[in-house]
Amino acid sequence: SASTSETAILQTVQSLPFLLAAIPAGLLADRSSRKTILAMAEALRAFSFGLLILLIALDSLTLSTLALLGFLGAMGTVAYSVTSPGLVPLLVARPLLSMANSRLELARSVAFASGPSIAGLIFNAAGASFSYSIALVLSLTAVNLLRSLPLNPTIPKHGKLWRELTEGMHFTFANPLLRPILMTAVIFNTSWFLLQAAYVPYAARHLGFSSFEVGATMAAYGVGMIAGAISAAWISKHIRFGSLIISGPIGALLGAITMAGSIWYPSFALVWGSFFFFGAGPVLWTISTATLKQAITPPNLISRISAVIMTLTYGARPMGALLAVAIGSAYPPEYCILAACLGFAAQLAIIMFSSVPKLADIPEAELA
């Protein structure tokens, strides 16, 4: 029964760790064993699930405690997301980076496709406690899988933290390829969370969707991700590398326009198609930009570069959620959908007027 503003506030709190913890996590990852950080990050998420189940069992869960537990779990997500890109080049040869990133995104896409719909079914059938218990078991399983990874060399660090941080920031902002990618991602994440924060109230009230229909439409995001991840290798062989990168912003704008169309023509098919576009296009962006970042960034900088990019891009998420709070408190959720549309148009314009679309192949580090 949460309002648009309440769900947006929940999104904001769960997004704050990306703004607050990404840079410290990146500095730690470049100084430590990435395998250990990954396992500990997932263990933190499992811990938040366990506390959540306990509060549900005690009938003590409130919106505030849910937000705090989401914040705790997101701290683990931040550490994981910053650390994992730096581990991939240590495990995979450079010519295979694109394939490795595609397979990682495919695995993530399967989770996004199955998670929301399964959660909706389990919640309707057995309630919240059983749903989160399954999540806890899966998270603990992930911890064990991460512990089985081979050890990676730890790069010794003895310099000043501030110097290391500024080194990563300078590389990111000075690079003519990373800078427009960063700007595009900031606008995308702001717009995406503006739309996400308003979607559930919009779907329930304007479209009249049930909880299962809401989960099914959100699952289309994962279906789109799977389609994008499976087709990424084939697409990359038939189009320029720069075209592969801009396919993400194009897909996002198509998704936003399709979602806006459901305001005047309420339809499950339109909303499902919207989330499909949001999954298929941006997953190609994720794969291609991750490959680009790994190819042009020195190994001892990769986690810090990831941290800087994550701080700004994921830090934009609470900004998008706060925009939803401001708009949703004064207007119906449809206005959030339309505002997000404008943002997705802006992110496409930024990347189109950069040098990124001109890339024919993955660039070498010295040419970036």
Image: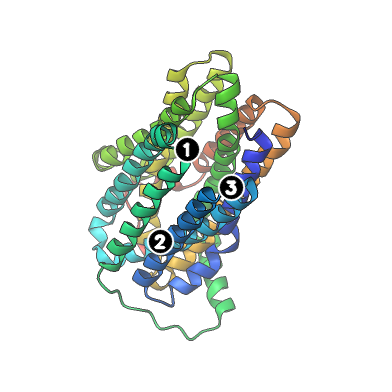
Label 2: which secondary element: helix
User: Mark 1 or 2, which is nearer the eye?
Assistant: 2
Above-or-below relation of 285 to 91: above
Residue of label 3: 317
Res. 180 visible in picture: no
Cα–Cα gap, marks 1 and 2 = 30 Å
Place of residue 188 in the rendered image (x, y in percent of width and height, measured from the top left): 54, 42
Res. 124 visible in picture: yes
Which residue type carries mark 2? Glu
Is residue 218 or residue 3 the one in the foreground?
3
- Quarter of the image that includes the N terminus: top right
Please tell me which of labels 3 and 2 falls first in the chain.
Answer: 2
Marks 3,1: beta carbons within 8 A: no
Above-or-below relation of 327 to 177: above
Q: Name the quadrant containing residue 246.
A: top left
Label 1: which secondary element: helix
Is residue 15 or residue 85 the one in the foreground?
15
Cα–Cα gap, marks 3 and 2 = 21 Å
Please tell me which of labels 3 and 1 falls first in the chain.
Answer: 1
Q: Is residue 28 left or right of residue 299?
A: right
Q: Is residue 304 left or right of residue 96?
A: right
Residue of label 1: 249
Residue of label 2: 42
Please tell me which of labels 1 and 2 falls first in the chain.
Answer: 2
Q: Going 53% across and 76% down the picture, which residue do you hit?
A: 164
